[in-house]
Amino acid sequence: MIRIGIIGMSAGNAHPYSWSSIINGRFDGSEISRVGYPAVAAYLTANRDTLGIPGATVTHVWCQERAISESIAQSSGIATIVERLEDMVGQVDAVILGRDDPENHVAMAKPFIDAGIPIFIDKPLAYSREDLAWFADQVQKGRFVMSCSSMRYANECRVAKQELAALGEIELITAVGKKDWKKYGIHLLEAVFAVMGDVKPLSVQHIGALDREIVHVQTVEGPDIMLHLFNSISGTFQVSFFGSNHWKLVDIRNSYSMFRDNLIEFVRSVEDGAPRLRFEDTYSLINVIIAANESRLQDGKRMLLS
């Protein structure tokens, strides 16, 4: 049995609750709703019959506040609360860093990477070139680092990939979502590139503004990609693929399914002893995320990607 420690939690991100519940196969819906995540309680309830991942259990939890740790432990059946995240070293076989504030990822991941403990890091992995280079260096040294948006494993994207050939030559891809580029741009990128496979980004240009972010990605011998993230809109994540023969709208709604498949892939990776997701793919998309922010800071300058 793989013993997993989970580290949370950042504001507005319920992943420590939902992911622990998906792995352990149990949850307290009233507690999850009480702390402000009724939608999470709803999708866990709707999928109760598929909860639990064989061969793994979340045994330890740490949050910056003891009360949050106690709440997650109560909700998901986690046996041990540690006072310092470093206390998990030697007690767990793998770690999930469930915070989505990338500026804290290096410091929080370092004790486990140094100890050779496999780690999955919530999206986005990094938001600075220095942090991305640090993670790349650790991977180069043979450390187990896995990170992505669960959108990579969305069923809706897998269906689109299956039907992609019927669209003809893909000329344009548009993607729309709510919230900000820093934390949610990676969702749109994972959705697009999970479907498109080996298409390589060539350049990126941020042509919007904060809270109304529009990013144009040029690809190598491939389609133009337009990404839109607006804080004030409602709706789900949507991606449209426009081909020479047909077009297809992908409306991504099943959060539970993508989370579960993502966690299964992490557990399988730990069992295999190496990430099943290539770090090169994660690096490429985080490079786009960082370059788009650099473009915004330089008044929309187009940034070439090495």
Image (tube, rainbow, N blue to C red):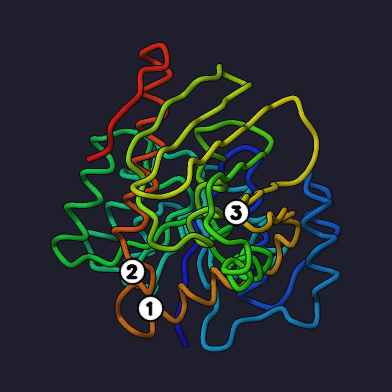
Provide residue 91's location: percent of width, then percent of height.
38, 73
- Please, is residue 249 above or below residue 73 in the view? above
Residue beneath label 3, please?
243
Q: What element carries label 3?
A: strand
Q: Earlier in the sequence, mark 2 or mark 1?
A: 2
Q: In this view, does 50 lie to the left or right of 130?
A: right
Q: Which mark is residue 118?
A: 2
Look at the numbered discs 2 and 1 and tell me whether their residues touch, using CB distance below 8 Å. Answer: yes
**Count of numbered tags:** 3
In this view, the residue in front, 143 or 28, is 143
Provide residue 277's location: percent of width, then percent of height.
38, 68
Between the C-alphas of marks 2 and 3, the distance is 40 Å
Look at the numbered discs 2 and 3 and tell me whether their residues touch, using CB distance below 8 Å. Answer: no
- Which residue occupies 48% across, 56% down? 193
Residue type, mark 1 in image: Val
Q: What element carries label 1?
A: helix
Depth check, mark 2 against mark 3: the one in front is: 3
Provide residue 61's location: percent of width, then percent of height.
52, 61
Residue type, mark 3 in image: Gly
Quadrant of residue 231 in the image?
Answer: top right
Residue beneath label 1, please?
270
Between the C-alphas of marks 2 and 1, the distance is 7 Å
- Which residue occupies 57% across, 25% down? 213
Residue type, mark 2 in image: Pro
**Residue at the farthest left position:** 141
Q: Earlier in the sequence, mark 2 or mark 3?
A: 2
Q: Which of marks 3 and 1 is nearer the N terminus?
A: 3
